[in-house]
Image: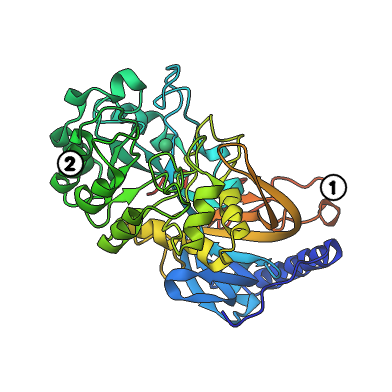
Amino acid sequence: MSDPKPRIFTRREILAGAAAAFALSCSGRAQGEPEYDLLLKGGHLIDPKNGISAVRDVAVHQGKVAAVAESIDPGKGFKVVDCSGLYITPGLIDIHVHVFAGTNERGSYAGDNSLYPDGYTFRVGVTTVVDAGCAGWRNFDTFKETVIDRSQTRILALANIVGNGMRGGKFENVLEDMQAEPTAELAKKYPEIVVGVKTAHYSGPEWHPVEEAVKAGELAGGIPVMVDFGSNLPERPIEVLLGEKLRPGDIYTHCFAGNRREMLEDGTPNPGLFAGRKRGVYFDVGHGGGSFKWAVAAKCLEAGFPPDSISTDLHTGSMNSGMQSQLLTMSKFLALGESLDDVVKQSTWNPAREIKREELGHLSVGAIADIGVFGMRTGDFGFVDSFGARQKGKQMLECEMTFKDGLLAFDLNGRTRQDWTELPLDYGRQGDPRWDGILNRRRRRREH
Ligand SMILES: [Zn+2]
C-alpha cells in the first residue's frame, strides 16, 4: 500500500515501453528454452488475497502463475511484456450475468434477454462469469451444451430454483415448479459448473421461493443461494430475509437498488443490511438495467456499508445503459470514493469466496493464470445509474490486456505484438501458442 500509484504515461513513453518489451522478448528467446512462457514486467500488482498492492513482476508457465517477485530476470521469459504504468490484477469475476442466449425465446433470460459472454468479458478484464439463474433443472443441459461448453469465458452458474429458469413471469411465479430436490441433483451432477442456487423475480407474498432455494443449497452440500428479492411486499420484509431466512454465506444481489427498502426514507441504510452482514450474508451489486441507484449506493457507502462484490447483471437491457461493463461499474465505485484496491478486491477475491471457488480470484504461485492488465484514465467523466442519474468522476479504468489460463485473450494496444515495419514484408501469422490464445490457441478445450 505504501507504493505510490503508477502515474499516467504519455503516448511517447508507452511506445518506448513497447519497444523495450520487444527487446526483452528477443533477449528471452536468444537464451534457449526460457523458464517461463510469459513474463509481465513492471506493473503495479493488486492481489488482495495475498495482501499485495505494489510493483511486481508476474511470471506464467503452462497456464499457471509460476513466480511473483519484485524483479524477475527478463531472460527467463519466453514472452516478456512491459506493464510499467499499468495495474495487474487477478482476472475479474462477475458473479451476476445472463448468458443463456440462442434459444430464440422472446422476453426471456433463457433467450433473447441474454448475451453470449465472450464479446463482453475479455475486453474488460473479466475471465469468469456466473450466470445468475437463467436456467433451472429442466433446461440446464441445453444451456450447458449450447453456451457453457462453447464459450472461451469461464462460465459458472447459479441454478434457478424454478425448473424452467428465467423464462418470464408466467414461469417464474409458479410455486409448484420451485423444487429443491431436482435443483440439488443438478448441482451435484455438475459440481464444476453449478456454484449455487438462484431465486428471483417472485411477485407473490410467500417465502416458499427463498425457503426452497435454501433447502436446495443444503441438499447440494451447502452451496450458497443468491436472492433477487423480486417485488417489495409487506408480508416478506427484507429484515426477515436477511435476519432469519438466509444463511451465512448466502448472497443478497441488487443491494443498492433501493426498491426493496434497502434505504429508509431518511436516507440511512436499512439496519437489516448491517444485521445481515453481521450474520455473514454477502451483499452484491448486480447493477443491471434497474437495480443500481446513486442515492442508495452513496448513502450506504457513507454509512460504512460497501458492497462485498461488484457485479454487472449483464443482459440486453443493461449492456448499453448506465451499466455497460464490469470495469465501468468498478469505476463507479471509485467515483464514490472507494480505493482501487477495494474495488479490485470486490471484483476478484471477494466474489471467488462468495461462490466458494477459492482457486480463482488471486495470483498466488500455482494459481490459474487468469490476469487483467489495466490503465487508469484521468479526466472529467460521468457515470449513469439505472435510473438515468449522473455522478461525476475523475478516474476511469481501461482494460489493456486480458489473459485466461495464461493465454492472451485481449490486447487493446497490441502491447504483445511487434510493429509490422520490423517484420519481413511477407510476415505470416504472429504469436506463439505458449502465450497467445488469440492467433495461436494452445488449448481449445474449455477448462473450469
Ligand atoms: Zn439478473
Indicate if the residue with disc 1 has its beta carbon within 8 Å of ligand 1: no
Amino acid tagged 1: Leu
- Contact? badges 2 and 1 (CB < 8 Å): no
Q: Position of residue 325 (x, y in %)?
A: 57, 44
Residue 111 vs residue 192: left or right? Answer: right
* Image quadrant in which you'd find residue 37: bottom right
Residue 411 vs residue 228: left or right? Answer: right
The N terminus lies in quadrant: bottom right
Q: Could you tell me which secondary element the residue under label 1 belongs to?
A: loop
Task: Tell me, for residue 6, which label it has, or none.
Answer: none
Is residue 442 in view from this perspective? Answer: no
Q: Check the image and report above or below for 209 versus 416.
A: above
Amino acid tagged 2: Ala
Q: Position of residue 287 (x, y in %)?
A: 49, 43
Colour scheme employed for the rendering of this structure: rainbow
Observer-nearest of 6 and 188? 6
Q: Check the image and report above or below for 330 versus 114.
A: below
Q: Which residue is mark 2?
A: 216
How far apart marks 2 and 1 lie (CA) works out to 61 Å
Q: Quadrant of ligand 1?
A: top left
Q: Could you tell me which secondary element the residue under label 2 belongs to?
A: helix
Which of the two labelled residues, at mark 2 and mark 1, occupies the earlier sequence position? 2
Residue in the image at 49% along x and 49% along y: 296
Q: Check the image and report above or below for 1 versus 382.
A: below
Q: Which residue is mark 1?
A: 425
Residue in the image at 28% along x and 45% along y: 196
Q: Nearer the viewer, mark 2 or mark 1?
A: 2
Residue in the image at 72% along x and 53% along y: 414
Residue 107 vs residue 218: left or right? Answer: right
